[in-house]
Image: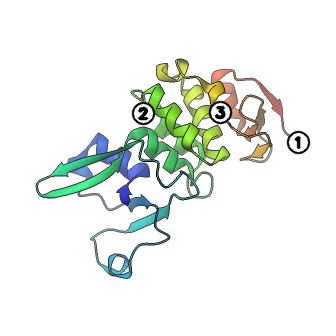
């Protein structure tokens, strides 16, 4: 029940050969509370970071996971849509909104139906709002054909940055330059 996800899955999908020689942490996700001791203590040649997805998705949700078989080894890996959702769980604590926007800009080929299914199955309002906001800010074609109204983004206000701009549509305060880039509707935050 452990899979390669987040930015590791996106980077692997883009270039699997150079990914193998990289030294950045490998991002793993799964439904276990934590990985077994033998796994955590083994020297994998590069750092391994694990995150439990029980609070992000229903444990039975397998949408957005694919099996990759190389030689005699089979690995489960997130699709780019699921990987981006996993990545956004760590914004703004570990990644900036600018980094998230840069990563989202590369995701021009997502399936609107897969994104919709994953966002409807996602339990995090923050992640849903961020994903939709960034996709709209990037102006991706696939976003334009999505049924955004079918995705529950909650009702409360969320602040991701102080002194930013409030996005009415996504009910969150974001850095002003992200609003201005696409002419999205906003209100100045206090």
What residue is rendered at 46% in x and 62% in y? 31
* Front one among 152 and 48: 152
Q: Is residue 65 above or below residue 75?
A: above
Q: Is residue 153 above or below residue 26?
A: above
Few, some or many residues within 10 Å of mark 3 (<14, 14–19, 20+):
some
Disc with the residue nearer the chain's start (3 vs 1): 3
What residue is rendered at 57% in x and 55% in y? 90
Asked whether the residues under the numbered discs 3 and 2 touch, taking CB atoms below 8 Å apart as contact, a structural biologist would say no
Left or right of 37 on screen, residue 52? right
Q: Nearer the viewer, mark 3 or mark 2?
A: 2
What residue is rendered at 30% in x and 78% in y? 42
Q: Secondary structure at mark 2?
A: loop
Check residue 190 in the rendering and tell me which mark sits there, or answer none.
Answer: 1
User: Which residue occupies the extreme left position in the image?
Assistant: 71
The answer for how far apart the CA atoms under marks 1 and 2 are is 33 Å
Q: Is residue 129 above or below residue 92?
A: above
Check residue 106 in the rendering and tell me which mark sits there, or answer none.
Answer: 2
What residue is rendered at 80% in x and 43% in y? 156
Q: Position of residue 107 (x, y in %)?
A: 43, 32
Image quarter of residue 136: top right
The answer for how far apart the CA atoms under marks 3 and 2 are is 17 Å
């Amino acid at each position: 029940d452990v899979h390669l996800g987040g930015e590791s899955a996106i980077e692997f999908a883009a270039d699997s050969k150079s990914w193998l020689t990289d030294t950045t942490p490998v991002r793993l996700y799964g439904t276990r509370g934590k990985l077994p001791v033998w796994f955590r203590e083994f020297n994998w040649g590069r750092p391994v970071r694990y995150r439990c997805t029980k609070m992000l998705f229903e444990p039975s949700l397998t949408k957005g996971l694919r099996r990759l078989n190389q030689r005699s080894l089979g690995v489960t890996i997130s699709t780019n849509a699921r990987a981006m959702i996993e990545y956004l769980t760590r914004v703004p604590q570990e990644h900036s909104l600018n980094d998230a926007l840069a990563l989202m800009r590369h995701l021009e080929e997502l399936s609107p139906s897969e994104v919709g299914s994953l966002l409807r199955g996602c339990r995090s309002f923050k992640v849903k709002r961020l994903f939709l906001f960034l996709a709209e800010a990037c102006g991706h074609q696939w976003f334009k054909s999505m049924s955004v109204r079918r995705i529950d983004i909650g009702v409360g206000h969320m602040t991701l940055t102080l002194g930013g701009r409030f996005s009415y549509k996504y009910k969150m305060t974001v850095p002003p330059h992200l609003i201005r880039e696409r002419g999205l509707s906003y209100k100045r935050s206090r």
